[in-house]
Image (cartoon, grey):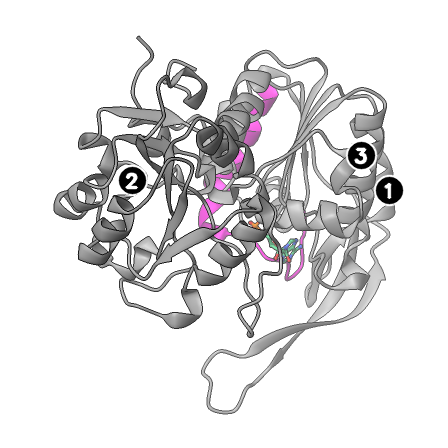
Amino acid sequence: MNKLSIADLKDLRGKRVLVRADYNVPLDEKAAITDETRIKETLPTIHFLTERGAIVILCSHLGRPDGKRVESMSLKPVAVRLAELLNQPVGFANDCVGEDVRKKVAAMKAGDVLLLENTRFHAEEEDNDPKFSEQLAGIADVFVNDAFGTAHRAHASTAGVCKFIKICAAGFLLQKELKYLGEELASPDRPCLVILGGAKVSDKIGVITNLMGKTDAFIIGGAMAYTFLKAQGVAVGSSLVEEDKLGIAKETLAKVQATGVKFLLPTDHVIAQKVETPVPGQKKPKIEFKNPQQSTDATIEVGYCGVDIGPKTIARYCAEIAQSKTIVWNGPMGIFETPEYAAGTFEVARAVAAATQAGAKSIIGGGDSVKAVKKAKVGDKVTFISTGGGASLEFLEGRELPGVAALTDKA
Ligand code: AMP
């Protein structure tokens, strides 16, 4: 990476370092944190700074408060948990800009840590407003971006502040993400396999196009498989299909054939009846699936939907996974939130873990595949789990991430 790293920073004692973290953690109705992975992942960066006597000012967003103060999206519970994890007090400021923040920062000593309130309580954050960026930047001498999950957004706290702070470096988490999703995939150990699933073809077409020349094979599952199958003329019944993406699906299939990369689509499915239940007072009927059953052939009859890959497909996909040396996975193989339709996703998760134990590198990105890997209890048996869903997809598409582009170039 040609960007300044936190490890390159010298003479940090007494310097005010603004760290953009990704503390967008899930909270339950009692404001208890239900998954603290994102908090723990920032500890190496914070320790590095406090051990060198820096004054650490953390900022982040949480949820989508749309520019208003929403108490249920306060970062206060994160400050409490962070203090426990760091084993030192963590101050909390009720806003991210303003007089009170300036006073709190002025009173900080070397090694102190302060967390600012949700940056998205201000509409100017997502607007990347220059005045707001300048205010945020005004409390710091150095900026460190460690928020990979938001690096694909050009917001005030991810990119805007870099215009007003001279030294802007990548934190350890950001670097780790870029290493696995970027460097490892630039020259992967072969055979290299990309597994894609989830709801929409439109979200993943860019990834297929970008990785076509780098990978040896693709495995496709989830609803996105039905758009590809329909584009090939296969009957997919009432499965979820993006009709307006059939053209691009056809073009992609033609490109895949021309490059000779393997492109596996499901050949059997778990199917279920689609039942649309009218909800009183609501225009859109609620969609339910009933009577799961295995489809014995490749086609699906009208009135039925593909909800998971079938047993023959699972066996074929797992065999492909077993012989791969680099595996990238984004998106579930079926509606895995429903236990009857989760076998495909969980079997793939277990096969990826087994291949990793046998020496392959596995990189899991995207919220749902991460959930699936954890639910299948193999979270500790894969090489790397990305903390950024949208960011990891955009990076795999080959796009420049504004939060990375804005950092200082290495001399
Ligand atoms: P994505 O955010 O694009 O990765 O999509 C994840 C969602 O896709 C999950 O909530 C799954 O339930 C859903 N999904 C996966 N397979 C299917 C399918 N065959 N039909 C409908 N939804 C699906």
Q: Is residue 218 visible?
A: no
CA distance separating discs 3 and 1: 20 Å
Which residue is labeled 1 in the image? 312
Q: Which residues are magenta?
A: 234-257
What type is the residue that disc 1 sits on? Lys
Q: In the image, is the residue at mark 3 within 8 Å of ligand 1 by its beta carbon?
A: no
Mark 3 or 1, which is nearer the eye? 3
What type is the residue that disc 3 sits on? Ala
Q: Is residue 283 visible?
A: yes
Mark 2 or 1, which is nearer the eye? 2
Q: Residues within 10 Å of mark 2 (few under 14, many from 20)?
A: many
Which residue is labeled 2 in the image? 154
- The answer to if 251 sits in the magenta stretch is yes
Which residue is labeled 3 in the image? 353
Q: Residues within 10 Å of mark 3 (few under 14, many from 20)?
A: many
Q: Which quadrant contains ligand 1?
A: bottom right
- Residue 52 numbered mark, or none: none
Q: Residues within 10 Å of mark 1 (few under 14, many from 20)?
A: some
CA distance separating discs 2 and 3: 35 Å
Instruction: Identify the residue shown where x is 29% and y is 20%.
Output: 408
Residue 328 rendering spot, x and y as whole percentages: 65, 30
Q: Earlier in the sequence, mark 2 or mark 1?
A: 2
Q: Earlier in the sequence, mark 2 or mark 3?
A: 2
Instruction: Identify the residue shown where x is 55% and y is 74%.
Output: 29
Q: Tell me which secondary structure the magenta stretch mostly adopts.
A: helix
What type is the residue that disc 2 sits on? Ala
